[in-house]
Image (tube, rainbow, N blue to C red):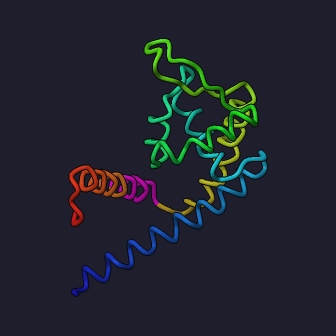
């Protein structure tokens, strides 16, 4: 194992730790709106994906989950009055998910609450470094996605 491999080990460990810490802090923001991490992110993503509704599979993809893993969360959100499930007007066999007015309100409130949180997390980081980080992480996501779709375990 050379120095580059050691750096990659440190980088992937740092990514995992940073992700966990970020999720933990974001969960605290979500709890202010009576949502958990599991329910807050779908509400935020539905709010970001638009007013026309989203098919459950598309939401699952955006969350990085299998559609079957999302069923219980969607049911919880429907039961809590934040999400509605409707027939897709383009395809009667399909269903779409839409935020209710309460869901839209909570999504907007959480987005607003997350702005200062994100700014504090990235305070003092050069915007060019943030752009580079985003480009690198997006590239990693794409490479992992390609490896998963082809069954390539080595990437």
Relative to 9, is 152 on the left or the right?
Answer: left
User: The magenta stretch spans which residues?
Assistant: 126-135
Q: As displayed, is residue 3 above or below residue 127? A: below
Question: Residue 45 lies in magenta, yes or no?
Answer: no
Question: Who is closer to the viewer here, 75 or 146?
Answer: 75
Question: Who is closer to the viewer here, 8 or 77?
Answer: 77
- Residue drawn at (60%, 54%) of the image: 119
Q: As displayed, is residue 133 above or below residue 49? A: below
Measured from the top left, where is residue 86 in percent x and y? 59, 20
Q: Which of the image's four quarters has the N terminus? A: bottom left
Measured from the top left, where is residue 100 in percent x and y? 70, 26
Measured from the top left, where is residue 78 in percent x and y? 69, 33
Question: Residue 128 lies in magenta, yes or no?
Answer: yes
Q: Which of the image's four quarters has the C terminus? A: bottom left
Looking at the magenta stretch, what is its main secondary structure?
helix
- Residue drawn at (30%, 51%) of the image: 145
- Residue drawn at (63%, 51%) of the image: 38
- Residue drawn at (50%, 62%) of the image: 125
């Amino acid at each position: 194992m050379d120095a580059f491999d050691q750096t990659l080990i440190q980088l992937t460990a740092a990514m995992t730790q940073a992700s966990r810490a970020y999720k933990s802090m974001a969960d605290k923001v979500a709890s202010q709106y009576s949502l958990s991490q599991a329910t807050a992110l779908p509400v935020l993503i539905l709010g970001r994906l638009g007013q026309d509704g989203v098919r459950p599979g598309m939401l699952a993809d955006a969350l990085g989950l299998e559609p079957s893993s999302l069923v219980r969360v969607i049911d919880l959100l429907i039961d809590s009055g934040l999400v509605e499930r409707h027939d897709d007007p383009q395809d009667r066999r399909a269903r779409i998910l839409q935020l209710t007015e309460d869901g839209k309100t909570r999504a907007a409130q959480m987005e607003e609450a997350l702005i200062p949180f994100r700014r504090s997390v990235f305070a003092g980081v050069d915007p060019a470094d943030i752009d580079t980080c985003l480009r690198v992480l997006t590239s990693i996501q794409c490479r992992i996605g390609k490896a998963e779709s082809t069954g390539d375990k080595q990437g």
